[in-house]
Amino acid sequence: MAEIGLFPLELVLLPTERVPLHIFEERYKELIGECLALDRTFGLVFADERGLREIGTHAAVTTVLERFDDGRLNILVEGRERFRLVELTGGRAFQTAEIEQVGDDEEEPDHGDVDRALAQFVRLKELTQSEVDDPAPERGFLSFQLAARVDFGAEVKQQLLEQRSEARRLHVVAELLENAVRTVALEQEVRERASQNGKVSSD
């Protein structure tokens, strides 16, 4: 087991996902400063009114976007491997914990789910006219890559993070994307009908 500095936040960072963070508390300035100086990751863990979740993600600082005179930082972090909290530890300004790594089983995803998830993602991009970049299936963790590009909410992302099968994750993500496509398409249809005073065009 290894000890790692924790950054509890009300967000979930998936492996391969990149998110910007604003660092302003002194304890986290210290944590991020050490990570930058020693080329280490820190542990980003979802925390809400229920407390810390058991499964978190190693976060690597990929870019320092801005440094302020008072020590505050704007950084870009990328999700790496997952871990499980074994025991919370103390002695530092920031929370630390003993952790163990979390991996997947050997179950391969179904090709049908791969094709379905990618097709629904493309359809959702078209409907929303989003300019988000496409995933790279050859890099692995397609489920995480897709989920990182769509706002499914923290609870859903945490459930995906805790799932230890890429096959099952991808099946769930494909269904989530299908539901999102149906919802967006319906919303657009409702808006179009409303703009026509509820009447369908005869053109």
Image (cartoon, grey):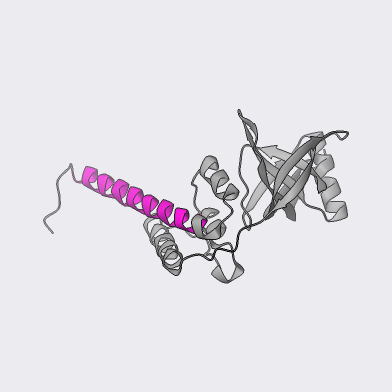
Vertical side of 43 occupied by 17: above or below? below
Image location (x, y in percent) of residue 87 = 77, 37
Q: Taking 8 as reference, is 160 left or right?
A: left
Question: Residue pushed farthest left?
Answer: 202
Q: In this image, 7 relative to 191: left or right?
A: right
Image location of residue 114, percent across then percent down:
46, 66
Farthest-out residue, bottom: 138
Percent position (x, y) of residue 155? Answer: 53, 40
Residue drawn at point x = 50 percent, y = 56 percent: 168
Give the residue at x 72% y 49%.
75
Residue 144 sits in quarter:
bottom right
Q: Count the numbered circles shown.
A: 0
Quadrant of the rendering where the C terminus is positioned: bottom left
Q: Magenta span covers which residues? A: 169-196
**14 to the left or right of 34:** left
Identify the residue at image location x=49%, y=52%. Answer: 150
176 falls in the magenta region: yes
Residue lying at the far front of the rendered structure: 106
Residue 132 percent across, percent down from the top left: 51, 59
- Say if residue 64 shows up in the picture: no
* Res 185 visible: yes
Q: Quadrant of residue 116?
A: bottom left
**53 in magenta:** no
**Observer-nearest residue: 63 or 123?**
123
Q: Main secondary structure of the magenta part?
A: helix
